[in-house]
Image (cartoon, rainbow, N blue to C red):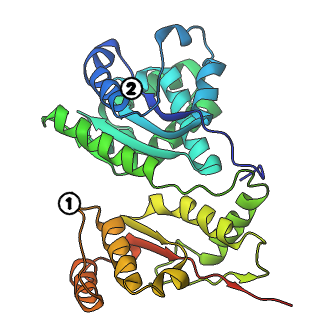
Amino acid sequence: MASSLNPKKIYDVFLSFRGADLRNNFIGHLYQALHHNGVYTFRNSEELKKGDQISPVLMKAIEESCIAIIIFSEDYASSRWCLEELAKIIECKEQKNLIVLPVFYKVDPREVREGRKSYQISLAKHEFKFGKDSKKVKRWKKALSDAGNLSEWHLNDGDESELIQEIVNKISIYLDRPLHVAKHPIGIYIRVTELKLMLKLESNDGVLMVGLWGHGGIGKTCLAKALYNALFIKFEGACFLANVRETSKDSRGLVTLQEMILNDILLPQQRLKVSNVDEGNNLIQRRLGRKKFSSSLMMWMHCASWML
């Protein structure tokens, strides 16, 4: 991350889409559902898409969003403004940890990532206008390929209302999970980047453990929280256990921790209750034991401090 300060986010969600029909139907219903659930959403307007250049307002809105939802429809790639939006979204995904969630609306993901059918026709028209070797068109193609490789939602003839509810539920999880790090987290995100490189998350080595060691009050807990915030979106389930040593001293402390692990990772509709430690062990083994290690993230705070 280029800045030592985490960029301020204004919007929870940025919607990228093409067409009045989509705006008045699927997008309109999705926007209302997000708004009803308290999700602050940026939905662009046609007046921001005039001339040959994408509006700076749109670029800024993408940078100031936590999540971008791209609705790939049949004629999405026909709009150079949509393609510029997409390229900016992918750039922010790589540089600013923007969460990108694609919806393939009545198109196959392969059409998007491989430039088939309507996407092939649209890209050919752009190549004719800007040149086959145009950096702009190559950038658009790469953005389409990158986004097309992200697996999220594919709607063909299914129930749109069910898909909208599924999207809202997932967005809510993403927005509710992040932990408060610090009022002024100066320099911490550079350390998070360094830690992520040390963890080699792209490898398939199974369970990873890291210890944070140092003087009390130097920011170990803040760093652990910031690392959790940067990682949890990559996993099917996630749990952050704070104050493990203090909590475990209580008579039901271990049971409380077991309940937190089960409920935070599984997110059941009805909260799971644990009567005793042995029952908790069996529940964790049975309910979590079949999950792949790579699909769950669990962090616990027991950072060691040393005194002089």
Image position of 12 (left or right of 161): right
Residue at label 2?
A: 76
Of the pair 157 and 126, the residue shown nearer to us:
157
The amino acid type of the residue labelled 2 equals Tyr
Image quarter of residue 302: bottom right
Give residue 249's position: percent from left, percent from top. 48, 88
Numbered-mark total: 2
Image position of 197 (left or right of 38): right
Say whether residue 110 is visible.
Answer: yes
Q: Secondary structure at mark 2?
A: helix
Q: Secondary structure at mark 1?
A: loop
Distance, label 1 to label 2, CA atoms, is: 40 Å
Q: Quadrant of the C terminus?
A: bottom right
Say whether residue 74 is visible.
Answer: no
Give residue 245's position: percent from left, percent from top. 54, 85
Residue at 21% in and 57% down = 269
Q: Is residue 138 above or below residue 4?
A: above
Q: Tell whether label 2 touches label 1 (CB within 8 Å).
A: no
| Disc number lying in front (1 or 2) | 1
Residue at label 1?
A: 270
Give residue 200's position: percent from left, percent from top. 59, 75
The amino acid type of the residue labelled 1 equals Gln
Residue at 64% in and 58% down = 181
Residue at 52% in and 26% down = 127
Of the pair 133 and 148, the residue shown nearer to us:
148
Are there few (<14), some (14-19), or many (20+) residues within 10 Å of tag 1? few
Q: Residue furthest front?
A: 251
Give residue 32's position: percent from left, percent from top. 32, 24
Image quarter of residue 35: top left
